[in-house]
Amino acid sequence: MHKKMTSLVILAVGALALSGCAGSKHAEASGETAASSDTLVFGVSNGYPPMEYTDPDTKEFTGFDVELGEAIAKKLGKTAKWEEMEFDQLINSLKTGRIDLTMSGMSDTVERQKTIDFVDYVIDGPQFFTSNNQAESIAKPADLCGTSVGTVSGTTYVDKIGEWSQENCAADDQIEVMRFPEGSDVLLQLKQDRIAGGMLGTVSLAYQLKENPDTYTLIGEPVSEDRYGIGVKKGNDELVEEVRQAVIDLKKDGTYDELLKKYGLGEYGVDEVTVNLGQ
């Protein structure tokens, strides 16, 4: 999902470079941004293609988030660096200053806005799916009642599954939510039929169905429409605005749309770059 990165700080992954873009007005004026140094450190949970993943052929770290993050950093006159961690560690790492931004397919929610701010950049939605082996017996969401469904620990999908189960399954026939560190773990468990279903975002599932048409089957429709957001530490309003403007600039110069098209995400782009769901 990307070109080679030259400034990657991430465990057991390669590097990737992106074509240059003109700097933002702030960067042109001062050569500095609201981040603490000449680098912009992104926190990422690897293993969620096409957003971020290690290419199985090249062994390079790549993805839509990675290329867009590199472009954002360049707009701000920075060098992008990437810190890999489990998804449920991202927000705490942002709050403690280990990273400057989270960029890892994280849904912007009102609850998360209590501790961090978001620059919204991709449309997504949680959706149930199953393995092709089980698709005949699990043809609709209701068939998941009384079974185990996997998703990524720390995501909003954990609660989404529980809420859906409470609303649609009998009290003695609730879904057991299975939590895994990464989306790739959910896919593997389902591929091996160790769980009955999974819930991931439509962005990732569109990629998986394209790459593995004989492996997974969608169940029903997305249970909601969400926005992925680039997370910024609460109170760092200057960096929020710089990142928002950088994404706007990348939309204007065509980079954003080119990356959406490259990763098969054309229908998931935002028309307006909002902060905290436009609230």
Image (spheres, helix red, strand yellow):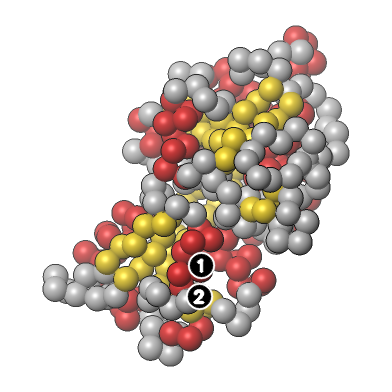
The amino acid type of the residue labelled 1 equals Leu
Camera-side residue of 259 and 278: 259
Q: Is residue 99 above or below residue 31?
A: below
As helix, strand or loop, the secondary structure at mark 1 comes to helix
Quarter of the image for residue 80 reads top right
Residue at left 71%, top 13%? Answer: 32
Camera-side residue of 191 and 214: 191
What percent of the width, then of the height, locates residue 4?
81, 45
The residue furthest left is 172
Figure quadrant of the N terminus: bottom right
Figure quadrant of the C terminus: top left
Query: Residue 187 shows which numbered tag?
Result: 1
Residue at left 29%, top 75%? Answer: 147
How far is mark 1 from mark 2, CA to CA? 6 Å
The amino acid type of the residue labelled 2 equals Lys
Which residue is under mark 2?
191
What percent of the width, then of the height, locates residue 179?
37, 57
Which class describes the residues within 10 Å of circle 2: few (<14), some (14-19), or many (20+)? some
Query: In the image, is 86 to the left or to the right of 145?
Result: right
